[in-house]
Image (tube, helix red, strand yellow):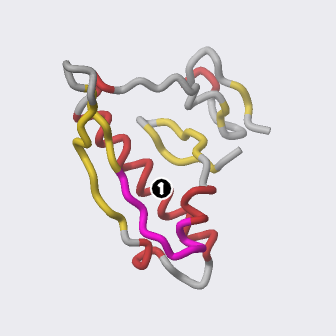
Amino acid sequence: GGQFFPSFGLPASFATAGDALAIKTRSDVIVCTMISQPDGTYRGDYCREIPVQSYLTDDDSAAATRLTADLVKDMEGVIRRQPEFWLWTYKRWKYIPEGDAPEKYPFYRRKAV
């Protein structure tokens, strides 16, 4: 499940439940990227707080969608800056939007249900 958001030039399905919870509880979101170090530890390399106040409207669902879209865009920027640290075992483009051209997607793609 999830909603489609642009990711690396293709729509990809992302869950919005965590962002919906942040909106519902009026809790800020903290984004942090952990970078592995030669000694086996990790360093919080990119951390910031996203105040949900700026997303709030009368429509919590629309607010969660906007928050998720911004987080997806932010995540893509982090990966583009340091692709050597990207390990994503989840098949992000497993489901494709109805009517989209399947040949644009990886071999494991399926139509969204």
Residue drawn where x is 45% and y is 40% of the image: 7
Q: Which residue is mark 1?
A: 69
Q: Position of residue 21 (x, y in %)?
A: 60, 65
| Left or right of 6 in this view: 77 | left
Residue 43 falls in image quadrant: top left
| Left or right of 99 in this view: 81 | left
Residue 62 falls in image quadrant: bottom right
Q: Quadrant of the C terminus?
A: top right
| Left or right of 41 in this view: 18 | right
Q: Is residue 111 magenta?
A: no
**Viewer-closest of 62 and 45:** 45
Which kind of residue does numbered mark 1 sit on? Ala
**Viewer-closest of 113 and 103:** 113
Residue drawn where x is 60% and y is 55% of the image: 16
**Viewer-closest of 28 and 59:** 28
Q: Quadrant of the N terminus?
A: top right
Above or below, 39 against 33 in this view is above
Q: Position of residue 97 (x, y in %)?
A: 67, 40
Above or below, 53 against 31 in this view is below
Mark 1, other Cα within 10 Å: few <14 / some 14–19 / many ≥20:
many
Above or below, 61 against 102 in this view is below
Residue drawn where x is 37% and y is 71% of the image: 51
Residue range corresponding to the magenta coloring? 22-31
